[in-house]
Amino acid sequence: MTDKITFSFGKNWEHFLKTLTDEKISIAASSIKNFMGVDHFQDKRVLDIGCGSGIFSYVMFQMRAKEIVSFDVDPFSVKCGEYMKQKAGNPSNWTVCHGSVLDKTFLSPLGTFDLVYSWGVLHHTGNMWQAIENAAHLVNEGGFFYIALYNNIGGVLGSRFWLGVKKFYNKHPFFGKYVIEPGYIVLCFLLNFFRLGTYIKQIMTYKKKRGMSWRRDVTDWLGGYPYEYANVEEVFTFMRSHFPDFQLVNIKSASGLANNWFLFQRKKI
Ligand SMILES: C[S@@+](CC[C@H](N)C(=O)[O-])C[C@H]1O[C@@H](n2cnc3c(N)ncnc32)[C@H](O)[C@@H]1O
């Protein structure tokens, strides 16, 4: 199978923004506040790598960051970021731009940040370890590095299987959208047939997960490619060897295929 990429994260985020509510924004804010144990970013320069819908950048603005830089490689995600910036009143301390975390020429003039946030992004770049390295270099001394990466799961229905599904979806986008997506949704309901009430309730309250939408996340999960993954130990090993001055501050580990969340802090020398 070829490595054709047809899926646009940004188009999916455009759909997501149509159903955005203040409640979802407030849940998104809680996810950052609770994981970091902070309630504002006053005097902080923050960077949102792979800003997607732009809601987390918006939250950073609401948390009174001194400066916010948001970028994404997908032009439709950049449009979403611009939309959220407009929603915030087009503040002059918030820049939304188009760029890739793999492009060192683009990154170098950005400088360093008190927070580098990249949730669910670096594994979609096509070169995850390089992306982690480039992103970590943007953290200033004493600054935080907040990333989430897909877990590495073995077994028949593990990460390798889903890599195949995503490759297939991208190679056959029509089939992906109109057969794989509805098929997956039906399968989810069938597998939960004997606990349907509970399952429907989980879908209805899905926004509690970072303010996200179940339907949009199904599309993101099936189409999101490139796709790489790493278990907690693999990430620790990489960080220890490449960034020994980063200390783990918080972690939320996944039991299945979902994201492991990491919060590191770069030591002050
Ligand atoms: C799953 S979304 C996550 C969006 C957002 N960070 C969030 O937490 O909701 C992944 C995003 O990463 C972006 N992305 C993928 N590769 C990238 C790269 N090389 N540089 C910057 N952004 C990238 C995609 O376009 C997409 O918007």
Image: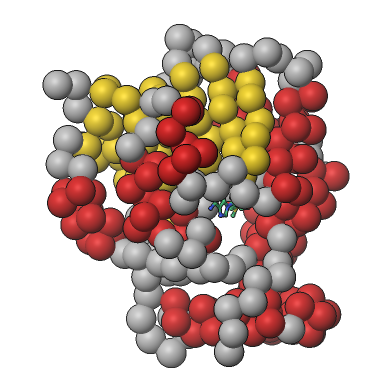
Q: Quadrant of residue 196?
A: bottom right
Colour scheme in the image? secondary structure
Residue 249 x %, y %: 27, 36
Q: Is residue 42 above or below residue 252?
A: above
Residue name at image x 64 percent, y 77 percent: 4
Residue name at image x 21 percent, y 43 percent: 243
Residue 173 x %, y %: 76, 78
For this orientation, the residue located farthest to the front is: 105
Residue name at image x 58 percent, y 78 percent: 3
* Quarter in which the N terminus is drawn: bottom right
Residue name at image x 60 percent, y 38 percent: 71
Residue 10 x %, y %: 72, 52
Q: Is residue 142 left or right of residue 114?
A: left
Q: In this view, does 214 lie to the left or right of 103?
A: right
Residue 16 x %, y %: 77, 49
The residue closer to the viewer here, 192 or 265, is 265
How many numbered marks does the figure carry? 0
* Quarter in which the C terminus is drawn: top left
The residue closer to the viewer here, 26 or 48, is 48
Q: In which quarter of the image is residue 80?
A: top right
Residue 53 appears in the picture as rendered: no
Residue 113 appears in the picture as rendered: yes
The residue closer to the viewer here, 97 or 24, is 97
Q: In this view, does 69 lie to the left or right of 150?
A: right
